[in-house]
Amino acid sequence: MNLSSFGNNGTSKEGNWSGLIQVSFFCFFLMLIGGCSEKASTNPQKPNIIIIYADDVGYGDLSSYGATEIETPNLDRLAAGGIRFTNAYATSAMCTPSRYSLLTGKYAFRHESAGILSAEDPLIIEPGSTTLPQMLEEAGYITSIIGKWHLGLGEKKEPINWNGEIKAGPLEVGFDQSFILPVTNDRIPTVFVEGHHVYQLSEEDEPLRVKYPEEGDHQYQEQQFGQGDASSPQVPQPLVGNLPSGHTHPEKLRYPADAQHSGTIVNGVSRIGYMSGGHSAWWDDEQMAATFVEKSESFIQENSENPFFLYLSLPENHVPRIPNSRFQDSSGTGLRGDAILELDWVVGEILNTLESNTLRDKSLVIFSSDNGPVFFDGYEDGALQKHNGHDPSGIYSGGKYTAYEGGTRMPTIVSWPGQIEAGTESDALISQVDLLASLAALVDVKLHDGNLDSKNVLDVLMGESEIGRDHLVQQSSDGLALKKGPWKYIEAGSRSGWAYNRHNISETPLNTDPLEDHEYLFNLEEDPEESKNVASKFPEKVKEMRSLLEEIKQAK
């Protein structure tokens, strides 16, 4: 399907006036006793809720957040119509943990399996537990996820049958509908899963088989596959089937990849892991964004008369970056920048669909990203060489994987026309883990799980308060950090040398000094770049922050 094939046709829907009158009368009565705000009374209906969640997009990747080499007009349009947050965080500098926190309202460091998952890992959210979609479903919402999942599929100790029913998954944790990228676009299998089955998998096709190396971490893969020489090269053979891989047929690649990413080749790009069969269901990377837009438009139009929740989880700009040809070479900053322009196009299409169906004023739209940016993440795709001065972390240091601010401080935009003042900015401290409690307050659902890290910051999200969280935890491959007021504390511990090897592979704006194993303390108001460790200067503050972090870690 081509990008140009999508239209924005829609019809205006009449509201349920009798329901509005009943609710308005009820709200008026509550106002008399102080139980309903004046703003709430002007829009008593539950809004549609759309979370657009980007991948590896940093604080400085949007022109509304200071980018000068890249223009993001649709994201800027969203920001101009709502609140642009400058002190908002993902809970982790890595994808799976952030997604877990967003949907469960819990810090992912509390779950031992919430690391970066493969397609062979089981579902890490317990079916029946409190989740964002489950809570909204309880409130009467139709719920859907479209896009990247990366939270595991299937049951523990039971291999997934990719040719049959695939469960448990999104439908078992509160979503009514799902159309997902099972893991990441650099991992196999390169198929979508709709509901409980692989999308468009033909019964006449060879069975789809999937296999990962027994050890999946970066260091292991490099040691096992990256140390051969001309006299005794180590060339791993496919673990299933005999399809070409980056190891066996590097001449078939669009661009080279490191050892970890040199598995089965799909669309000229090698992936993590190996697969065979299922060719009828393989996705086309260049059409992925258009596919997600089409599915999102259909969901919005089909549910235009009911409150709906859409979790649109986009892969841009995670590697491999293969944007549609319409966007290739369009940003002037390489494939990474091209993918950001494709992301911006998707946001524009969603906004256009809401507007054409007269749903924009009835819809709360939230945009953010799962973790910070990275130029080189396994593929020599030119992102390092062609960034053209673009700094994806803005004024902050570091990026994906790291404990520096660039790893978790995220561009975050919240917009609801008529309810949130347009064109505003907030420095209130908020975390994505707070969306569960905040949206529960919005739709008047009482949360029964007492073991949540989620805080109700609805007044902040609505622009009615500048008082956000007192503190929050940032997870990374360097360990945990604690943000409280102007202070940032990073606990002592082992650090991820491989993460810095990726960031520091050449001179880019993301170059950072690798953290050593001792404690760090930064004053972010005076030193937003985290260049001066003042732990020795303020030992009492270190003690206070260490104690609070330990208290949080031991809680629940």
Image (cartoon, helix red, strand yellow):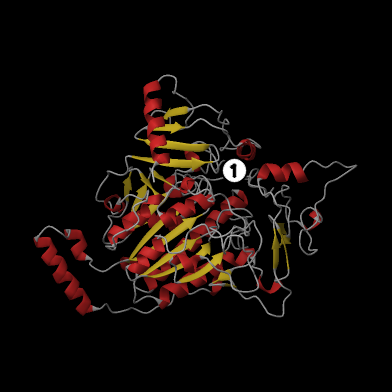
Foreground pick, 220 / 85: 220
**Label 1 sits on residue:** 388
Q: Position of residue 99 (x, y in %)?
A: 48, 54
User: Which residue occupies the extreme right position in the image?
Assistant: 231
User: Which residue occupies the extreme top position in the image?
Assistant: 537
Does residue 369 appear in this view?
A: no
Locate residue 359: give its quadrant.
bottom left
Q: Position of residue 337 (x, y in %)?
A: 57, 51
Locate residue 226: give its quadrant.
top right
Q: In the rendered structure, which amino acid carries the disc numbered 1?
A: Asn
At mark 1, the secondary structure is: loop
Foreground pick, 457 / 152: 152
Locate residue 250: give its quadrant.
bottom right
Against 124, residue 495 (above or below) is above
User: Which residue occupies the extreme left position in the image?
Assistant: 32
Foreground pick, 47 / 478: 478
The number of numbered discs placed on residues in the rendered structure image is: 1
Against 148, residue 406 (above or below) is above
Does residue 282 appear in this view?
A: yes
- What residue appears at the point 66 percent right and 69 percent down from the top-left corner? 282
Position of the N terminus, as image quadrant, is bottom right
Q: Position of residue 463 (x, y in %)?
A: 27, 51
Q: Position of residue 445 (x, y in %)?
A: 29, 62
- What residue appears at the point 45 percent right and 64 percent down from the top-left corner? 173
Against 533, residue 246 (above or below) is below
Q: Residues within 10 Å of mark 1 (few under 14, many from 20)?
A: some
